[in-house]
Image (cartoon, rainbow, N blue to C red):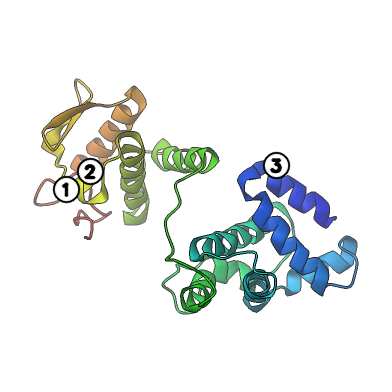
Amino acid sequence: MNYQKIIDDFITRYPDYESDVMNFTEYLEIHWGNSLSGEPLRILLKGIDVEFILQSLIYNVEDIQRYKSKTKAKRYATVVGLFFNDIRKTTDIANHELYDVISFNRLRENSYMKRMMAYIEKCDLLAGIVEQEPLTFMQAEELLAWSNEQLEDTEWEGAADLKKAMAAIGIKMMMLYGIKYRELRKIKWENFDEFYGFITVNGFELRLPTKLSRQLQQVQQFVFQNKVKSNEDLLFTDGNGEPWGR
């Protein structure tokens, strides 16, 4: 096992993240006075925790002043988290404590991103506010691939599966038409014309791509057959038929 191969494989899959993962690697090499291959590498990666990654962010912000905006600092934290999630999926290196906190929702008390953002938001050296960056082409492809995966199996077994399917439909519509979340929440099943493949939003008839129209029909059939429709006939609900939150 060789660290260079791990980062090369990661960068091949995520070329937009090269600079951030190389900046993390710089910090790692400075603080690891041993081999980055074989058993020493395994020991290193098994022992890295959130504090180590946080210190690498502090190094890049305070020591060498590489990151000067909150948005770029957040991107660094996100990329390093993704990097270790990729290590989890592509190697047999066990570091369950780190992998778990990275996977936690940001709002959870001990989550990885909550710890990173606590530093970023309070750091006076970082300018501005954390802005949402537009998706890269690769990120958009990954998001669409995830959405289609949720809609491949129409035998949704529980509320969580249907919730993901609904989210997938919503994501595809937002990406395709630029519809805002608050407008998605208002759409009703009566606005969907399954025969002609149209959906009406704010009085505008939007033609659906064939695949998306078929996927929406599959969701509609499941919703109606399993009686998880909302009382308001809203299209976008959770797996129990409750309207999406504001």
Mark 1 and mark 2 lie on one chain; the one further toward the N terminus is 2
Residue 17 has which mark?
none
| Residue 93 coordinates in the image, percent (x, y) | 74, 63
Whether residue 191 sits left or right of residue 53 in the image: it is: left
How packed mark 2 is, by other alpha carbons closer than 10 Å (few <14, some 14-19, many 20 or more), is: some
| Residue 129 coordinates in the image, percent (x, y) | 42, 66
Residue identified by numbered label 3 = 12
Residue identified by numbered label 2 = 223
Q: Nearer the viewer, mark 1 or mark 3?
A: 3
Mark 3 and mark 2 lie on one chain; the one further toward the N terminus is 3
Mark 1 and mark 3 lie on one chain; the one further toward the N terminus is 3
| Residue 24 coordinates in the image, percent (x, y) | 70, 63
Q: Secondary structure at mark 3?
A: helix
Asked whether residue 152 is in view, the answer is yes
Residue at the (49%, 72%) spot, across then down: 117
Residue 229 has which mark?
1
Dividing the picture into quarters, in which one does residue 159 lie?
A: bottom left
Dividing the picture into quarters, in which one does residue 242 lie?
A: bottom left
Q: Nearer the viewer, residue 153 or 195?
A: 195
Asked whether residue 193 is in view, the answer is no
Which image quarter is the C terminus in?
A: bottom left
Whether residue 134 sits left or right of residue 193 in the image: it is: right
For the residues labelled 1 and 2, the Cα–Cα distance comes to 6 Å
* Amino acid identity at mark 2: Val
For the residues labelled 3 and 2, the Cα–Cα distance comes to 40 Å
Q: Nearer the viewer, residue 241 or 200?
A: 200
Q: Secondary structure at mark 1?
A: loop
Note whether 235 is above or below 66 in the view shown: above
Cβ–Cβ under 8 Å for marks 1 and 3: no
Cβ–Cβ under 8 Å for marks 1 and 2: yes
Q: Secondary structure at mark 2?
A: helix
* Amino acid identity at mark 1: Lys
